[in-house]
Amino acid sequence: MRLHLTAGIREFIAANAEWLTVFQLPAYAPGLNPTEGIWSLVKRDLGNLAAADLSEITRTVQHRLKKIQ
């Protein structure tokens, strides 16, 4: 769900426009949020992972983050 597009949020923004400034950022902006670039590298290893449980996913993410370091 795109929370920023819900009717309630739009109403809140309109009602508080005198003090609230909303900036629409692109869906993917690693230049604005460096975490996105790191996450894209980590997701490469997760894309084809057939994990048996959450601990396997956790180990894979930790291993990839250590490789990036």
Image (cartoon, rainbow, N blue to C red):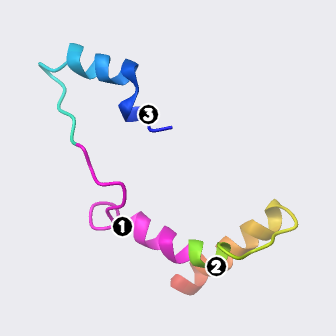
Location of residue 53 (image quadrant): bottom right
Element at badge 2? Answer: helix
Badge 2 crowding class, 10 Å Cα cut-off, few under 14, some 14 to 19, many 20 or more, is: some
Numbered range of the magenta stretch: 24-42
* 33, above or below 24, in the image: below
Query: What residue is drawn where x is 27% and y is 50%?
Result: 25
Query: What residue is drawn where x is 80% and y is 72%?
Result: 50
Give the distance between the C-alpha atoms of the residues marked 2 and 3, in whole angstroms. Answer: 28 Å
Location of residue 6 (image quadrant): top left
Who comes first in sequence, dot 2 or dot 3?
Answer: 3
Circle nearer the viewer, 1 or 3: 3
**Mark 3 sits on what residue?**
3
Circle nearer the viewer, 1 or 2: 2
Q: Which mark is residue 5?
A: none
Give the distance between the C-alpha atoms of the residues marked 1 and 2, in whole angstroms. Answer: 19 Å
Who comes first in sequence, dot 1 or dot 3?
Answer: 3
Badge 3 crowding class, 10 Å Cα cut-off, few under 14, some 14 to 19, many 20 or more, is: few
Q: Position of residue 13 (x, y in %)?
A: 25, 22
Element at badge 3? Answer: helix
Q: Are marks 2 and 3 in contact (CB under 8 Å)?
A: no
**Mark 2 sits on what residue?**
45
Amino acid type of the residue that numbered disc 1 sits on in the rendered structure: Pro
Query: What residue is drawn where x is 38% and y is 20%?
Result: 7
* 43, above or below 53, in the image: below
**Mark 1 sits on what residue?**
34
Q: Is residue 21 magenta?
A: no
Q: Position of residue 63 (x, y in %)?
A: 67, 80
